[in-house]
Image: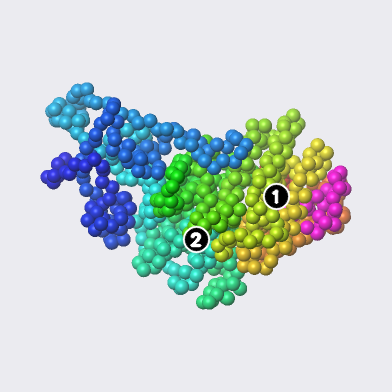
C-alpha cells in the first residue's frame, strides 16, 4: 500500500531507527530500540522504509545478502536453525575438543518469474495480471524475501514462536546476531524496584562478587552488570528479569562471603543470617512475576544459573532441577546452542577488534556450557540428559584474561600456565565431555542392566573412563595440579590460585567415584572388580589431604562453602566409610588407621558448614551414623541390611520428616520395594541419596 511518501532506494537495508539516525547515536537495531525505550519513545520507534536495489551477478546471486553475511560474525538471521547444515560438537574423538564446525550454507538463487499467476479465488484476484507481474518483479528486501529456510519454518508460524515471528516480520533476532547486552531484556515490563540494601552496600556486594565469586560460574559479565546497575539506580525502575538476576547475585554473595569479612569492610555491612535465603526466594518470586517461561529472556537463564550455586544448601534441589531444565529450553529458544564456530582472527589484527561483539559471544558461550556441564554431570541421578552433543554447535568459551592489563602484549603472561577467571569453568567443561562419553558407551554396552553376561563389558568401560579422567588430570598445567608448591603466577585479586589444585583434585576424585559407582560394593567383595576399591580409596585420601591444609582466608572459606566442594567431600568420605565397613571382606591391604583419620577429617570439613547448609547437615548425620556402625564392631552377617537400617534411621531423623509417622518416610524415600537395602543397591535412583 502506498503511503504517499517517496521511498528512497538503497543497496543496503536500513537497520537503525530513524530517531537514532537523526541524533547520530548508536542504535541497538531492534524495534523498539534500547535508546527509544530509555527515552519513553518506544511507540514511535521505526525504521526508514527503503527499496533495496540489488545487483545481480552470475546466476542471480543477491550481492546485498552476501555483503550482510560478510559483515556479521555469525550467520544471517534469515538462515534459520532448522535448515542449517551443522556439524555438531565432536565428542567421538578421544581428544577433548572445543570447536564446532558449521558446514557451508549454499546460496539459493531466487528463480525469475515465468509469467503472470492466475488466482481467481485469491484475495488479490481483482488485480490485473500486469499488477501481479509488477509485484513479483519489484525489488525484494532482505526482510520480505521468502527463502527456503523461511519456507521450512513456515509451519511454525502458527505456533507463535517469537524467533520465527521475528524472521517473517523483518525484526532482527537477538538470539542469532550478537547485540549489546543492554538489548537482551525483551520484556518491556518495568517497575520500581527494591534495592534490598543501600546503594553503597549493593555496590560493595557486586564488587565482591566480581572479584571473589564470578570465577565459579562465568555466567555473568560483572563489569557490564555493574554498569547496568548504575543505570537502573538512576532510573529507579528495571525489567523484572534483570531484577531476578540482581537478587540471585546478592544471594550467592551473602552466602559465600562470611559475616566477619562483611563487618570488616571500610563501610561495614551487617546482614541477617537468613538474608541469602530471603534473596533466593525473592529472585524466584520475581522470575515468576516476569513470566519467564513465556517471555524468554537471557537474564532469566543467568539468574537460574546463579541460583543453582545456593539452592542445594537451602534444601531446594528438586526446585532447581526443574528450573535448570527450564533454563536449558529457554537457552535453546534464544539460540545459545547454535552460535556456530569461532571465526579465525586474521594475522596482524588486534584483540580488541569488535570487542563488544566478542564479549557478547563469549558470555553466551559460557552460559550455554554452564547448562551443558550441569546436565551431563547429572546423568547418573536422572538416567538421561536433556542436551545431546549432536544437537548444538556452540563451542566452549575461550580462555579470556581477567583484566585488560593481563592481555597486554608484554610477553609476561602465559595463558596456558596462569589461572584466569575461566580456568575453573573450562576445566569442568572438558571433564563433562568425558563423563558424557562414558555414559554413552555404558548405554551401548548394556547399561542400565545387571545381567552377568554384560558385567565384564561394562567394567571395561569403567576402567577406560578411569584412565581417561586421570590422563586428563595429568595433562593440566601445573597451576591447576601441583599441590603444596608456591605459585607466583600473575592473577587478579580474589582468584583462589593457591586453592585451585585442591579443588581440581577433589573434583577429579568425584568424577572417578562417579564412573565406579555401579561397582562400588562389588569392588569390596569380588576380586574381579578390586581395581575400583584401590582407585577410589587412594584418590579420596589424596583429595581430603589436599583441602584440609588450606589456610584460613576469605578465599578458602568461600571454597569450603561451595556446594560442589561439600558434595565431593561427602562422596569421598562415604567411600572411605564403605572401605572400613567391608575391611574384613576385601583382600587389598590398606592402612585402616589412615583411612579412618581421613574419614574423620572429611567429616570435620563438612561440619563447619552444618549450620548454614542442609547438604552439610545431612552429610554429617549420615557419616556420623556410618562411623558409629563401624566403630561398634557389632555388624551382623548381613551387613547390607545393617546399612539399610542405618540409612532409614538417618532419613527419618531429618527435620523435614519429624512430624510424620514412621510409615510415611518409608513410602516416600523407598517407594519401589519393602526391602530397603535391595531397593538402595539395585535402583540407580537410590545413589542420589548418597550424593556420590
Query: Dot 1: what SS?
Result: helix
Left or right: residue 99 versus residue 550 is left
Residue carrying label 1: 509
Give the number of marks. Answer: 2
Most extreme residue toward the top is 114
Whether residue 286 is visible to the viewer of this picture, yes or no, is no
Looking at the image, residue 92 sits to the left or right of residue 581; the answer is left
Task: Point out residue 303 in the picture as x, y percentages from the top left corner.
Answer: 49, 56
Residue 364 position in % (x across, y down)? 46, 49
Residue 25: image location, x then y, percent: 28, 57
**Residue 659 found in image quarter:** bottom right
Q: Quadrant of the N terminus?
A: top left
Q: Residue at x 42, y 48 (%)?
A: 349
- Looking at the rendering, the stretch of residues picked out in magenta corresponds to 569-598
Q: Residue 47 in magenta?
A: no
What secondary structure is the stretch in magenta mostly built from? helix
Q: Decide: is 339 above or below 497.
A: above
Residue 405 marker: 2
Depth check: 8 or 567 in front? 8
Q: Nearer the viewer, residue 238 or 395?
A: 395
Q: Secondary structure at mark 2?
A: helix
Crowd tier of the residue under label 2, counting other residues whose Cα lies within 10 Å: few below 14, some 14–19, many 20 or above: few
Q: Residue at x 85, y 45 (%)?
A: 588
Instruction: Sort mark 1 into few (<14), some (14-19) or many (20+) by Cα contacts within 10 Å.
Output: many
Amino acid at each position: 500500500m502506498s503511503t504517499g511518501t517517496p521511498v528512497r532506494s538503497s543497496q543496503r537495508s536500513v537497520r537503525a531507527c530513524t530517531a537514532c539516525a537523526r541524533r547520530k547515536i548508536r542504535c541497538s537495531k531492534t524495534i523498539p530500540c534500547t535508546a527509544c525505550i530509555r527515552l519513553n519513545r518506544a511507540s514511535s520507534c521505526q525504521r526508514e522504509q527503503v527499496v533495496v536495489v540489488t545487483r545481480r551477478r552470475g546466476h542471480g546471486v543477491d550481492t546485498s545478502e552476501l555483503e550482510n553475511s560478510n559483515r556479521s560474525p555469525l550467520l544471517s538471521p534469515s538462515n534459520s536453525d532448522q535448515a542449517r547444515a551443522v556439524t555438531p560438537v565432536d565428542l567421538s574423538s578421544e581428544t577433548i575438543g572445543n570447536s564446532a564446525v558449521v558446514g557451508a550454507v549454499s546460496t539459493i538463487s531466487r528463480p525469475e518469474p515465468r509469467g503472470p499467476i492466475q488466482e481467481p479465488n485469491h484475495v488479490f484476484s481483482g488485480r490485473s495480471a500486469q499488477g501481479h507481474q509488477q509485484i513479483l518483479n519489484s525489488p525484494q528486501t532482505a526482510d520480505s524475501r521468502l527463502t527456503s529456510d523461511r519456507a521450512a519454518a513456515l509451519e511454525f508460524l502458527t505456533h507463535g514462536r517469537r524467533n520465527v515471528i521475528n524472521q517473517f516480520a523483518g525484526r532482527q533476532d537477538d538470539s542469532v546476531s550478537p547485540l549489546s547486552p543492554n538489548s537482551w531484556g525483551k520484556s518491556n515490563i518495568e517497575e520500581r524496584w527494591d534495592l534490598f540494601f543501600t546503594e553503597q552496600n549493593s555496590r560493595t556486594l557486586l564488587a565482591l562478587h566480581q572479584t571473589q565469586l564470578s570465577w565459579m560460574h562465568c555466567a555473568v559479565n560483572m563489569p557490564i552488570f555493574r554498569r547496568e546497575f548504575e543505570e537502573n539506580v538512576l532510573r529507579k525502575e528495571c525489567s523484572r528479569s534483570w531484577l531476578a538476576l540482581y537478587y540471585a547475585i546478592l544471594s550467592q554473595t551473602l552466602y559465600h562471603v562470611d559475616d566477619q569479612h562483611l563487618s570488616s569492610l571500610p563501610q561495614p555491612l551487617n546482614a541477617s543470617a537468613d538474608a541469602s535465603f530471603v534473596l533466593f526466594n525473592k529472585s524466584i518470586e520475581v522470575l515468576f512475576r516476569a513470566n519467564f517461561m513465556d517471555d524468554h529472556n537471557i537474564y532469566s537463564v543467568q539468574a537460574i544459573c546463579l541460583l543453582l550455586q545456593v539452592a542445594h544448601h537451602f534444601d531446594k534441589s528438586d526446585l532447581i532441577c526443574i528450573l535448570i531444565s527450564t533454563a536449558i529450553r529457554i537457552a535453546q529458544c534464544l539460540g545459545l546452542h547454535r552460535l556456530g564456530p569461532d571465526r579465525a582472527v586474521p594475522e596482524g589484527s588486534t584483540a580488541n577488534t569488535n570487542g563488544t561483539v566478542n564479549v557478547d559471544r563469549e558470555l553466551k558461550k559460557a552460559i550455554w556450557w554452564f547448562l551443558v556441564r550441569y546436565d551431563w554431570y547429572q546423568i547418573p541421578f536422572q538416567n538421561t540428559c536433556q542436551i545431546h552433543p549432536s544437537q548444538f554447535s556452540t563451542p566452549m568459551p575461550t580462555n579470556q584474561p581477567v583484566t585488560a592489563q593481563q592481555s597486554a602484549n608484554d610477553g609476561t603472561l602465559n595463558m596456558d600456565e596462569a589461572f584466569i577467571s575461566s580456568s575453573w569453568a573450562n576445566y569442568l567443561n572438558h571433564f563433562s565431555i568425558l563423563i558424557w562419553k562414558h555414559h554413552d558407551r555404558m548405554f551401548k554396552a548394556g547399561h542400565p542392566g545387571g545381567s552377568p553376561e554384560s558385567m565384564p563389558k561394562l567394567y571395561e568401560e569403567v576402567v577406560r573412563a578411569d584412565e581417561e579422567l586421570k590422563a586428563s588430570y595429568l595433562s593440566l598445567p601445573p597451576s591447576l595440579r601441583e599441590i603444596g608448591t608456591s605459585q607466583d603466577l600473575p592473577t587478579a585479586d580474589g582468584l583462589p590460585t593457591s586453592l585451585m589444585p585442591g579443588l581440581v583434585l577433589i573434583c577429579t576424585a568425584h568424577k572417578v567415584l562417579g564412573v565406579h559407582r555401579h561397582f562400588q560394593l562389588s569392588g569390596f567383595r569380588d576380586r574381579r572388580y578390586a581395581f575400583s576399591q584401590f582407585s577410589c580409596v587412594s584418590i579420596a585420601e589424596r583429595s581430603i589431604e589436599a583441602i584440609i591444609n588450606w589456610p584460613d582466608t576469605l578465599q578458602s572459606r568461600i571454597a569450603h562453602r561451595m556446594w560442589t566442594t561439600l558434595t565431593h567431600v561427602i562422596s569421598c568420605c562415604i567411600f572411605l566409610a564403605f572401605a572400613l565397613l567391608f575391611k574384613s571382606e576385601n583382600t587389598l591391604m590398606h592402612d585402616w588407621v589412615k583411612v579412618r583419620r581421613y574419614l574423620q577429617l572429611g567429616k570435620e570439613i563438612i561440619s563447619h558448614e552444618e549450620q548454614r547448609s542442609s547438604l552439610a547437615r545431612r552429610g554429617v548425620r549420615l557419616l556420623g551414623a556410618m562411623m558409629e556402625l563401624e566403630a561398634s564392631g557389632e555388624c551382623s552377617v548381613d551387613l547390607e541390611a545393617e546399612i539399610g537400617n542405618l540409612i532409614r534411621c538417618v532419613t527419618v531423623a531429618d527435620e523435614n520428616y519429624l512430624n510424620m509417622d514412621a510409615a510415611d518416610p518409608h513410602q516416600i524415600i523407598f517407594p519401589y520395594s519393602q526391602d530397603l537395602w535391595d531397593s538402595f543397591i539395585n535402583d540407580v535412583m537410590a545413589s542420589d541419596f548418597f550424593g556420590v
